Amino acid sequence: MDPSANTESAFEQAKKYGEDLAKLYAIEKAKRVNLQISNQKLQAIFRTTPDGLAVLNARLSIEEANPAFWSLVEQPAPDSAVPLADVLPFANLLDALKQHNTNHTGVQVEIDLPLTKTIWRSLLINAVPLEAGNYHGWLLSAHDLTERKRLENLKSEFINIAAHELRTPLAAILGFSQVLKETLKDEEGLAGHLIDTILQSGNRLKDIIDELIEFADIRYQTENSSAGEAFNILDTITTVLENVRRAAEEKNLRVTTEFPTQNITITGNRSILQEAIRHIVENAITFNDPDGSVTVRVTDTADTIIIEVEDTGIGIAQTEQTKIFDKFYQVEEHLTRSVGGLGLGLAIAQRGVQLHNGDISVRSKLGEGSCFTISLPKTATTETVETDVGLRDDFHQTLALGKDFAKVVAAERKLAQTLKKYQSATQSLRQAVKSNASPEALLEILDQLESDTTEKTG
């Protein structure tokens, strides 16, 4: 065999091997560049995100954390790993991480971190597991809820103040307006029309305050206050439908029910559940098209009750469906403002369902309608029902007292007018006696007095 041929063959093989190595190097270099770019992106996100981020190892020590994390916990960044328990010493957080350390599911815990004796910071902690080869750890994020909670407390304080401060003057407005209407009931013209307008506006304001007070009441209810009473949920839904029948008839809506043949007994707070269902049904009527329909469907399972309220109304956009249960939120303001409202109805309904360990959801399509689904356990809790006396009872008591006071004032006015007539008649009788008037003249005075008295008391 020619030695030169062997040499040439070996050279070609070496050349091909070198070319393959060059290609592999180019590929690996490109991968390394992409990896460096990805790493720089992650580092930029890690450093600049407003939420606090921390990487924990399997021993729950902080190996790395971004500046936002150390700012949230009001501590300087350490030079080495530090135990999470030294930074966030909260048993519920630590126990949750230890108990779920072998799971792939995340952990979510809300904590209140004391900064001073009087200043606290509310943090929402989310943690997801990290696993790569033999490495096990957690990526922990901390979101500051302090400002949101402060705003929520301000909203609640405003609601309570508004409810208290508006109810007393409203009681006087409604009470005296009703008295004026009764006084002028035989008169026609501008006065009667103005009184009716005042009453209608006052009652509309009353409905708004009712909604505010209902929200303030249910906000501070607990699961314990939703317990104890066993009742037929079908009767409760029927009561709701009876109360909204007139509103449905005004829009020519067809309201149908699909109920099981047997009664369904549930344990909970009847009034809270009735109000929750009422808000859902009223929404189905308010945002429905004329000549449409509303269907209320109840399904009974072994331990759960499913209540569906389906309508043929305007529907809800996909982007809005996650927000409709927020307080004071209204879908498509140009649509909802034409019917008014504070945007609290669905928040009240959701809170009422949650108090019974239930769930509420919606599926909807624009222009085709919506279907709200309420899932309720048949037995909410075994605790005793607390007395349900709150802002709402105080408000209606104030309204009643205001109307009663107005009636007393009106009665006092009528009595004063009657007494004035008696005084006038008495003076006329005395003058007639002194002037030796005839018996016919005296009888005429007495007849006039009797006529005036009958008219006033009648």
Image (spheres, grey):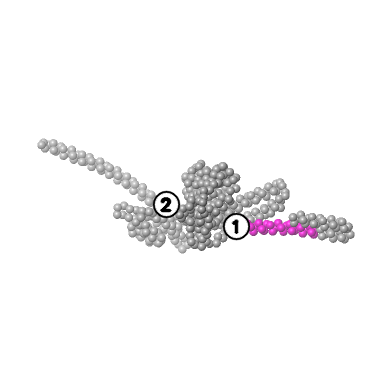
Determine the residue positioned at 43% across, 54% down: 143
Q: Nearer the viewer, residue 165 or 453?
A: 453
Give the amino acid type for the residue marked by disc 1 in the picture.
Answer: Phe
Where is residue 432? Give x, y as percent. Answer: 86, 59
**Are there few (<14), some (14-19), or many (20+) residues within 10 Å of tag 1?**
many
Q: Which stretch is magenta? A: 395-424
- Pointer 2 with pointer 1, Cβ within 8 A: no
Q: Indicate whether residue 402 is drawn in magenta.
A: yes
Q: Nearer the viewer, residue 177 or 364?
A: 364
In the rendering, which numbered label is found on residue 78?
A: none
Determine the residue positioned at 68% across, 48% down: 194
Where is residue 151? Give x, y as percent. Answer: 50, 54
- In the drawing, does residue 444 fall left or right of residue 222? right
Q: Earlier in the sequence, mark 2 or mark 1?
A: 2
- Helix, strand or loop for the magenta stretch, by majority: helix
Residue linked to disc 2: 50
